[in-house]
Image (tube, rainbow, N blue to C red):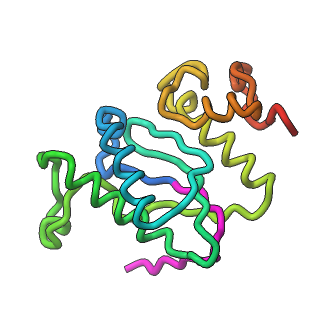
């Protein structure tokens, strides 16, 4: 079995990618966006964090989270979120033999991608990646058209112009 090595930095800011197990033609996250939002709130009440940026796509999500000072346990937050969401969704998904043996649902991939953000440039690049993602995956033609994104909050804050990303260049912030 592969041994995953994770680093843990108290109070750090992280970029995450979390996927559904069955991604092909799966729109569960946007179909059940209210359940997912409730799951985020549920976790935040129990294990505080700050969402710096997020995009919810039909079959996966990307986000940047900052943990409180002294806290390193981002894994428990994802475990709680996946569990809450899974319990709120009626069963019916395909469940592999190994998951069935462990009495697991088949909604989420077991693992997630975590990247420690180490500089402002690193943060900015991942922020742009998050907001460009619905265009990248063909969900919309313009970043501003995707409703399940923190892009709209960043427009209100003046970080991005509303037409950001329309030219295809998504690596430049308005206020740099």
Left-right relation of 163 to 44 = right
Magenta part mainly helix, strand or loop? loop
Look at 57% across and 56% down and name the residue there.
50
Q: Please state the extent of the stretch shown in magenta in the rendering.
A: 1-16
Q: Residue furthest right?
A: 176
Tell me, yes or no, whether the highlighted magenta stretch contains residue 12.
yes
Look at 57% across and 18% down and name the residue there.
141
Look at 24% across and 54% down and name the residue there.
86
Viewport quadrant of the C terminus = top right
Give percent across and percent down for residue 162: 69, 21
Report the front residue among 23 and 64.
64
Give percent across and percent down for residue 101: 13, 71
Left-right relation of 35 to 61 = left
Viewport quadrant of the N terminus = bottom left
The answer to whether residue 122 is above or below residue 173 is below
The answer to whether residue 147 is above or below residue 172 is above
The answer to whether residue 82 is above or below residue 8 is above
Left-right relation of 29 to 167 = left
Look at 35% across and 64% down and name the residue there.
80
Quadrant of res 117: bottom right
Label tally: 0
Report the front residue among 109 and 35.
35
Quadrant of res 10: bottom right
Give percent across and percent down for residue 14: 61, 61
Give percent across and percent down for residue 16: 54, 56
Tell me, yes or no, whether the highlighted magenta stretch contains residue 44.
no
């Amino acid at each position: 079995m592969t041994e995953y090595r994770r680093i843990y930095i108290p109070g750090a800011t992280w970029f995450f990618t979390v996927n559904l197990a069955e991604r092909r033609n799966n729109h569960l996250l946007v179909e059940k966006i209210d359940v997912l939002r409730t799951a985020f709130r549920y976790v935040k009440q129990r294990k505080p964090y700050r969402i710096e940026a997020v995009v919810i796509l039909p079959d996966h999500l990307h986000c940047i989270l900052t943990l409180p000072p002294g806290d390193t346990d981002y894994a428990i937050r994802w475990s709680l979120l996946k569990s809450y969401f899974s319990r709120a969704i009626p069963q019916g998904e395909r469940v592999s033999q190994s998951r069935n043996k462990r009495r697991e649902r088949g909604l989420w991939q077991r693992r997630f991608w975590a990247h420690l953000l180490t500089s402002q440039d690193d943060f900015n690049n991942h922020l742009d990646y998050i907001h460009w993602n619905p265009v990248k995956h063909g969900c919309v033609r313009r970043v501003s058209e995707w409703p399940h994104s923190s892009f709209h909050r960043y427009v209100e804050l003046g970080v991005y112009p509303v037409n950001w990303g329309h030219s295809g260049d998504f690596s430049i912030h308005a206020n740099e």
